[in-house]
Amino acid sequence: MSRKYDWRTGCDVEATLCVLGGRWKPVLLFHLLDGPKRFGELCRLTPNATQRMITLQLRELEEDGVIIRTVYPEVPPHVDYRLSEFGQTLEPLLLSMRSWGEDFKRRQSGLQSEIPELSRETG
Amino acid sequence: MSRKYDWRTGCDVEATLCVLGGRWKPVLLFHLLDGPKRFGELCRLTPNATQRMITLQLRELEEDGVIIRTVYPEVPPHVDYRLSEFGQTLEPLLLSMRSWGEDFKRRQSGLQSEIPELSRETG
DNA sequence: TTTGATACTTACAAAAATGTAGGTACTTGG
DNA sequence: CCAAGTACCTACATTTTTGTAAGTATCAAA
């Protein structure tokens, strides 16, 4: 979902997708549900994402007000990220989405093993 | 969210985003929650989307098993689209996402009018 | 023969998102 | 001087998504 979201014509589901719909946002948010994390921790927890992407995704989440970035003026640098109060309201939604996603995956793998000829990917 | 989704490493929220995360999918799904619709109806209901995009988005939704495409072999052509049984399980999720999106939009417009200097877009 | 109706398809172009590889800044400690 | 440690940033390339404009197929009716 594009980040260029028109507040007038865009539907409300699109607004939500625009907040959550980045390649690494869901996984980052799940890690942050466990509590504040430093940048390096998030990198280690998300080894398939590059530092650049993690930075970009965190910046957008911050811009949307769902996470808060705190800089401690030390050397070496110390920054941490945590959910804002508003960001915490995402938890039930993320859990619902995870739950539906589980069902979907189960369904997909079921269909794939039972009726492989219906799969457009492998057929 | 990319349609190239790795079922092994991808988290379940990503699976959901991969199904819902197209430019026109949410609005199409909402129209289909009202009942089956013909292609032309969906085009008229979604005037900002081109026929091409509507076709593409419907095809992906069909591929993911959330909608069903029925062709009546007539002239002129007659095709309709409806939610599958599985697709109907999306309704509560879509409603939750819409609800969170409303809150988000309210919050964003509130912030913009009250503290405009905090907005990165308009500031 | 041309038009109308419907549901598309194709070729091309532009925009957006993501990835790759490297560099930066700062201070402490050897 | 050099390395370590942390949190980035920059330039560039690739991939993915979306958009634009036009064409296609079929049969009936005018």
Image (cartoon, coloured by chain):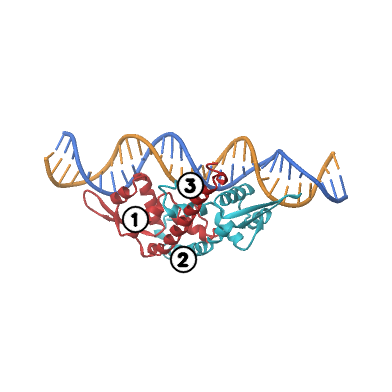
Chain colours: A cyan, B red, C blue, D orange
From the viewer's perspective, tell me whether residue A60 is left or right of residue B88. right
Residue A60 on image: x %, y %: 56, 49
> Rounded to the nearest whole Å, what is the CA distance between mark 1 and mark 3?
21 Å
Q: Secondary structure at mark 2?
A: helix
Q: Residue at x 48, y 57 (%)?
A: B103
Q: Nearer the viewer, residue B109 or B8?
A: B109
Residue B5 rendering spot, x and y as whole percentages? 50, 55
Q: Is residue A42 visible?
A: yes
Q: Are marks 2 and 3 in contact (CB under 8 Å)?
A: no
Q: Which residue is mark 2?
A: A103
Where, quadrant-wise, is the C terminus of chain B in this rendering? Answer: top right
- Of marks 2 and 3, which one's residue comes earlier in the chain? 3
Q: Are marks 1 and 3 in contact (CB under 8 Å)?
A: no
Q: Residues within 10 Å of mark 3 (few under 14, many from 20)?
A: some
Q: Identify which residue is drawn at 38% across, 63% down.
A: B88
Label 1 SS: helix
For label 3, the residue is: A2
Instruction: Specify whether residue B9 is in view.
Output: no
Badge 3 sits on which subunit?
A: A
Residue type beneath disc 2:
Asp
